[in-house]
Image: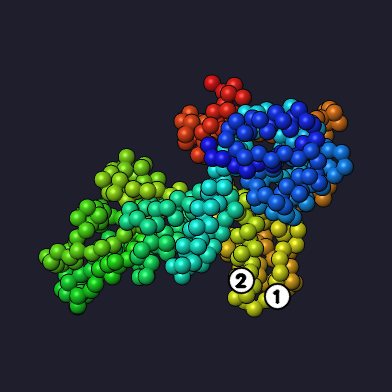
Amino acid sequence: MQSLSILIIEDGVNQRELLRDFLQSQGNRVFTAGNGLEGLECARNQCLDLVLLDFKMPGMDGLTTLEKLRQINPETPIVMMTAFGTIETAVKAMKAGALDYLTKPVDLELVLLLVDRVAAQRTLLRENRLLREELVRHGGDSSPIIHQSASMAELVNLAGRVAPSSATVLIQGESGTGKELFARFIHALSPRATRPMITVNAAALTESLLESELFGHEKGAFTGADRRRIGRFEEADGSTLFLDEIGELHASVQVKLLRFLQEREFQRVGGNQTITADVRVLSATNQDLKARVKEGTFREDLFYRLNVVTLEVPPLRSRREDLAPLMDHFLRIYAAGNRKNITGFTPPARNLLLKYDYPGNIRELKNIVERAVVIARETLLTPRDLPLGMPSDEGPADAVPEKKEGRENESLELRPAVEQLERDLIRRALEKCSGHQTHTAELLGLSERMLRYKLQKYRFK
């Protein structure tokens, strides 16, 4: 475990010293404060990785302290500790910027898991910051992949780590998720970035045309071949070739591609001269290539040559934290491109966009925002600027809310509701991953250690 600088702001001496001794025993550097004012003073003078903050304190309460801590450094993670685990307390803390909250008496195992989580996030943020700096040095955009979710941060980080190598990379994901954007990101961070990346869409060409497009042809190789043509592999010598829709490759092209990946050589269509080229191959597909291999429609040896590293780009509906920054990004682009003074979304329009599932992923979101900008009459986009097919929050005018027996006495405590949701999500993820804990942890965005803790906590067998 990495060593962190942690501040504990807690008016209870016993609780404060217990936490201090425990965190120090784990190798962390720990500061303590008995009230909000002392905590703020420490935050101004120290570089902190985490703050554990009591909610109910005499004088300046935890919520006010949290807001002031955020003003000092908005990037410092803050975890609220409270004996009053109601939904109101938790919601206020989260809205004010808390990373999470713990109920008293504090479970030390949960504290340790939170520390591990913060340490992992700190490493990821540092590596991604270095990647952005490296991209700027290569002359690229400092933020080419707009994201806020942890799953995308990890994916961008992995893409940045494989970029300097010559390894083939297979980018998988649904249509519209931004697979080509990842290919361009990898190329931009590679030593080949001084030359343009060459892109070929395998689904857009017939078998004969695709073979000629990739490997070139000699004069007279087929009807209409009135001159020699240089293929994309020759054109990409010293650079990167991105093969989109790789699952659509015909059998004969698969054979020639495999030979190139093994030997770094090929022949033009209709020719017998062996040509070598130094090309890094990136590929993308929205198909399940493993299933295609089992069906016998995709070569197994080619599959393993293509996916030395695999990037699984998640659909937009599974990373909703990215929706708001993407919406704002596309709004700025299309408002500027159409010379329109549109500054944002009305709350109802934003709410509709945030709740929609986007079967077409980022491509669909871009289309919706561009269309809305083009037809908008006001400086804010409204629901009437959005496609008519988008679901609305408004039900029928005469709809009567369903009455549930005993609703008045329903508990409003957050933790039981969150725990039930966690149980359901973990159960579904386990079923989807056939009980494989490593894959389940990846699907849920948890560390394996955190998953094992939750499996034990909820008594999963």
In the shown orientation, is residue 391 left or right of residue 125?
A: right
Q: Residues within 10 Å of mark 2 (few under 14, many from 20)?
A: some
Q: Nearer the viewer, residue 298 or 154?
A: 154
Residue 76 seen in the figure: no
Q: Residues within 10 Å of mark 1 (few under 14, many from 20)?
A: some
The residue lying at 27 percent from left, 67 percent from top is 237
Q: Are marks 1 and 2 in contact (CB under 8 Å)?
A: no
Residue 415 position within the rendered picture, expressed as x and y whole percent measured from the top left:
72, 32
Look at the numbered disc 2 and give the secondary structure of its residue. helix
Q: Which residue is mark 1?
A: 341
On screen, residue 108 above or below 185: above
Q: Which residue is mark 2?
A: 334
Spatial CA span between label 1 and label 2: 10 Å
The residue lying at 57 percent from left, 38 percent from top is 116
Q: Nearer the viewer, residue 48 or 90?
A: 48
The residue lying at 71 percent from left, 34 percent from top is 102
The quarter holding residue 224 reads bottom left
Report the amino acid beneath label 2. Answer: Tyr
Extreme residue in the left direction: 272
In the shown orientation, is residue 411 left or right of residue 225?
A: right
The residue lying at 61 percent from left, 24 percent from top is 457
Residue 455 position within the rendered picture, expressed as x and y whole percent measured from the top left:
57, 26
On screen, residue 344 above or below 27: below
Residue 210 position within the rendered picture, expressed as x and y whole percent measured from the top left:
29, 63
Residue 384 position within the rendered picture, expressed as x and y whole percent measured from the top left:
72, 64
In the shown orientation, is residue 183 left or right of residue 447?
A: left
